[in-house]
Every structure is written in C-alpha cells, then in structure tokens.
Image (spheres, rainbow, N blue to C red):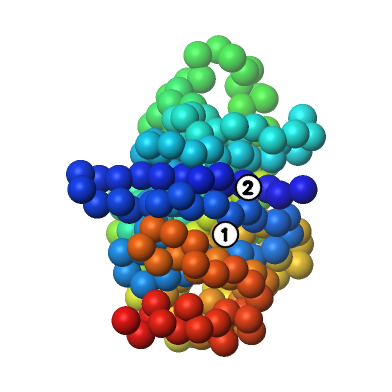
Amino acid sequence: MEVLKIENLKKHFGGVQAVDNCSFSVEPGKITALIGPNGSGKTTVFNLISGIIRPDSGKIFLYNPFLFKDKNITHLPPDIISNFGVSRVFQQSHLFANLTVEENLLLAFNNNDQNFWSSVFGLESWGQKSASAETSTRQSQKKIVAEYLALFRLAHMAEKPARDLSFGQSRLVEILRSLINPHHLLILDEPIAGVTPELRDMIKKLLLELKEKGETILLIEHDMNFTLNVSDRVIVMDAGQVIAEGTPDEIRHNPKVLEAYLD
C-alpha cells in the first residue's frame, strides 16, 4: 500500500517540459526524498501534488485511510487536496506577520474560509456551535498548540509576533503548523534552506522522531548530506524525469546520479 502514487505525470510551460512522464510512489511511515539538480522539476511535482497547478497528463493517487482505497486527486483544487490529508511546507515563508506564533498555529485547525476569518478576527461562527462548545474547542486546540511548541522548544515564543522571528524560527513554525493540520502525508519543500546549523540539527532530529511516530514524509532538500542521512528512500529527477530510485547508499554510488550532478 502506497500513501502517494504518481503515474506518468507531464507538465510543460511554454516550450519547457518541466515534468516528463514522471512516476514514483511514497510508502507509509517513511521519509522519502525527491532530489535533483536545479530545474529538474522537483518543485513542479510538489505543486502538481498540492493542486496548485494541473498536469497536462498523468494521474496522482492519494491513499484514503478511512475508505481503505486510493483517491484520484489529479484535478482537485488545493483546499480539497489538503482536506484529503496532504499538508505542505513551501520554500518561502507563509506566516501571517502580524499574528502571534500561537495564532498562526491555531489557523491550522480551520478548514474553511468561515472558520479562517473567525480565527483571525474573532468573529462569531454563525451559530453553528454554542459559545461553550466553541470555548471548549478552542481551549483544546490551544493545548495541542502548546504541546507542539514545547516539542519544538518554542514555548517561550507563543505570544511573539511572527514578524519578529528569525528565518530559521519561521521555518520551524511552518513545519509545526503543517503537523497540526490534519494529514497523513507531509510534504516539505527545502525545510532547512537558510537555517543555522543548530536549527538544521533540530529539524533533522524532529523529522526522525516524526518518522518513529508513524509520519509519512516526502521532502525536497538540496543539502545532500542532510538528505541522505535522514531519508529511507531517495528518488532522483533530472530534466523532468525520474532517473534513479533507491536507498541513500545506492544513490550515493549510482553513476546516473553522479553524472546528473556533475554535468
């Protein structure tokens, strides 16, 4: 059983074939890395999985643990794909600068626009829940957020505005928010890019701890030392195609991979 299965994906932008007949799968409870030289199509594949862009052809299947079967998500919009269980961290920061760390994290619990704006501005929830039920729910959510902040050693920053965070701290908060968002596949686009060595080690430790807890993670990361030491399986792309798959040790010695990176 694969959590994610991609079959013959193709995507071009003008005259550029960004993804060309790409196929691979992601197994549950493991860290899978998608690597390749700049321009090889990795982030385009992530955007296709997330529904941000649509493929020219091919299919994307996500395993639904509640229905015990695959769901074709190829042409679904991003919000529906997220609700089906895909949670993503992007390359660039997407925190709300004027909200506190806690407020940014509480947004992960809301899956529609109504609840989103209720969270941001404290609006009433249109009578769908009683005031006591809303209060109880929010207290429970705040408790979960506090537990995750403690896990990430960020408890002292709960009331700090996101605009005051360092780049590395912002990355940690974004990973944390993606974890709080209900999911069964976590995809991370360059989670350690631009962070300090100390935070890099912390993120590595956290990813390994998450795997031990059963998380399924698909990541892009250009730091090969980090990637090959944290991943169970590595998929290598070049010119929009998968050119190799295997364990980190197999990838280290694969002549096609060495050629792609040395070209």
Name the secondary structure under disc 1.
strand
Q: Residue at label 2?
A: 4
* Residue 127: x %, y % from top left: 55, 12
- In percent of the image, x 45 and y 65: which residue is there? 237
Query: Which label belongs to residue 218?
Result: 1
Q: Is residue 75 above or below residue 231?
A: above
The reply to whether residue 48 is visible in this rendering is: yes
Q: Is residue 9 above or below residue 246?
A: above
- In percent of the image, x 73 and y 55: which residue is there? 28
Name the secondary structure under disc 2.
strand
Could you tell whether 217 is left or right of 52 in the image? right
* Residue 71: x %, y % from top left: 64, 32
From the viewer's side, name the closer residue of 77 and 125: 77
Could you tell whether 165 is left or right of 83 in the image? left
Residue 253, by quadrant, is bottom right
From the viewer's side, name the closer residue of 258 and 70: 258
Q: Are marks 2 and 1 in contact (CB under 8 Å)?
A: yes
- In percent of the image, x 24 and y 52: which residue is there? 16
Viewport quadrant of the C terminus = bottom left
Q: Is residue 189 above or below residue 244?
A: above
The reply to whether residue 102 is visible in this rendering is: no
Q: Is residue 250 above or below residue 110?
A: below
| Marks 2/1: CA–CA distance | 10 Å
Question: Disc 2 or disc 1, which is closer to the eye?
Answer: 2
Q: Residues within 10 Å of mark 1 (few under 14, many from 20)?
A: many
* Residue 145: x %, y % from top left: 60, 52
From the viewer's side, name the closer residue of 29 and 149: 29
Mark 2 or mark 1, which has the lower sequence index? 2
* Residue 98: x %, y % from top left: 31, 49
Q: Amino acid at mark 2?
A: Leu
